[in-house]
Image: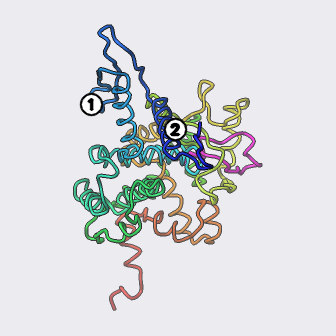
Amino acid sequence: MRFIIESGKIDTNDVQNSMEAMRRKELLEKHPYKIWKGKDSKWYTYLPDDKKGRTLKKRTSQKAIEDDVISYLKTELENPTLTEVFNEWNDRRLELKKISDATHLRNKQVFNRHYKEFGKRRIKSVDADMIGEFLEAQIPRHNLTAKAFSDLKTVTRGFLKRAKRRKLINFSVEELFQEIDTSEADFKKVIKEDYEEVFSEEEMPVIMNYLEDNPDMMNFGILLMSVTGARIGEIAALKHSDFEGNNFKIRRTETRFTDATGKYVHIVKEFPKSQAGVRTAIIPKDYEWLVRAVKLQNPICEYIFMKDEERISTRAMRMRLKRICKKLGIFHKSPHKIRKTYGSILLDNHIDNKLIMEQMGHTDILCTEEHYHRNGKNLDKKSRIISEIPEFKAN
C-alpha cells in the first residue's frame, strides 16, 4: 500500500482508495466463476442462482462486470440467508469438535424440516418478532411435541447467536425466546401404552428362548443387550479387549452421520453417549456362557460383532429385531425398548439405585424412573396384585 505524505500528514483519500482496491481484490478472489471478454468485446461471468444454479451476466466493461460480482458478494457476505448462517454455525461447531457428527446431522434434519422456505430469507430482513411468530407457528403446523419444539429452539438459538456475534442482527436472542408465547397445552401429547414401550413378562421368555435357539452374531448381540441393558450402539462397538472375565467395559459407541454424497455412514466414536456411559456392564451368572459363545464365533477380528469380515451395524441389529418380533407375533419394539425393559426389571426388583445407575449409564435415578420404568405385567396379573391388597378385600 502506498501512502502520499504531504507536510508530515497522511493523504487520507489515498489510504481510502488503496483500502477499497484491496477490498475489491479480496472479494473478486472469492468469486467462484471466471470473468472473461467475449468475441463481441463484452465482458461475461456467472453469478450463483438459487433456482437455476447460475445465471450468465454480460456488461460492456470489465469494471462494470466486476462491480456486479462485488455487489453480489457483498450481499452474500454481509447479509447471508438464514440457511447460510445456520450452516456456518453448525459446520463450525463440528470443526471445533463441540458437537459430534451425529449431532451435526440431527441439527441439519431439524433445520431442514422447519426452515426449508423461511431459511431462504436474508438475515437482515427478519427481526425478533418475525422469528418468534415463525417458531410459534411451527407447533400447530407440524403438531410438535414439547421435546421437538425444544430441539427447534436449540438450533434456532444457536445460529442466531452466531449471527449476533457477526453483528448481522442487533436484537437480543435471549429476550426473543423469553417472549415466545407457549404453554404445555399447545403441544402434542404422545400417549404410549406399556405394551409399546417394554417387552411383557410373557414376551421376554419367548424372545430370549428364540435368540438362544437360533445362535448367530446378531442374535447374540440382541441377547447381550437384553441381559445387560447396554445401548445398541455400545454393543455394536464392543471389542475383544473390552471383556474382563464375564463382564465388559463400555468405552465407545457407534454413531451415524451423512457423507458428502448424502449417504448415511456408521462409524465407531471413541467415547460413549455421555460421561456416565463409561462403565462396566455386569453379565448375570446364568448368561456367562454368552461371553464364550460370542468369542468362539469371532475369535480373531478386533470387534466382537462381525459378519463377512465387516462390523455389524446398529441398523442391521434393528432390522433383525424387527423381523424376530414379526415372526413371533410380538408387537414390534426397537432395541431401545429392550433397554427400557431391562431398566424396569431392575426397578421392579428394588435393586440399589447406585447399581441401577451404573448398569444403565445414567447420572440420576430419576432419569431411569421417569423415562424407563414401565409395567410389563398383563392385566390379569395387575388385577390379582391389586386384589390382594388387604384394604381392598371385602369384610
Vertical side of 349 occupied by 135: above or below: above
Q: In this rendering, would 94 be left or right of 84?
A: right
Q: Amino acid at mark 1?
A: Lys
Q: Which of these two is toward me, 10 or 263? A: 10
Name the disc covering residue 51, or none. 1
Q: Does residue 1 show up?
A: no
Q: Amino acid at mark 2?
A: Ser
Q: Secondary structure at mark 2?
A: helix
Vertical side of 380 occupied by 117: above or below: above
Residue 332 belongs to magenta span: no
The quarter of the image holding the C terminus is bottom left
Percent x, y for residue 183? 29, 72
Q: Does residue 381 show up?
A: yes
Real-space Cα distance between discs 2 and 1? 37 Å
Q: Which of these two is toward me, 162 or 144? A: 162
Q: State the extent of the magenta-drawn residues as a range.
A: 231-253
Q: Secondary structure at mark 1?
A: loop
Q: Which of these two is toward me, 30 or 218? A: 30
Residue furthest to the bottom in view is 395
Q: Which residue is mark 2?
A: 18
Percent x, y for residue 138? 26, 56
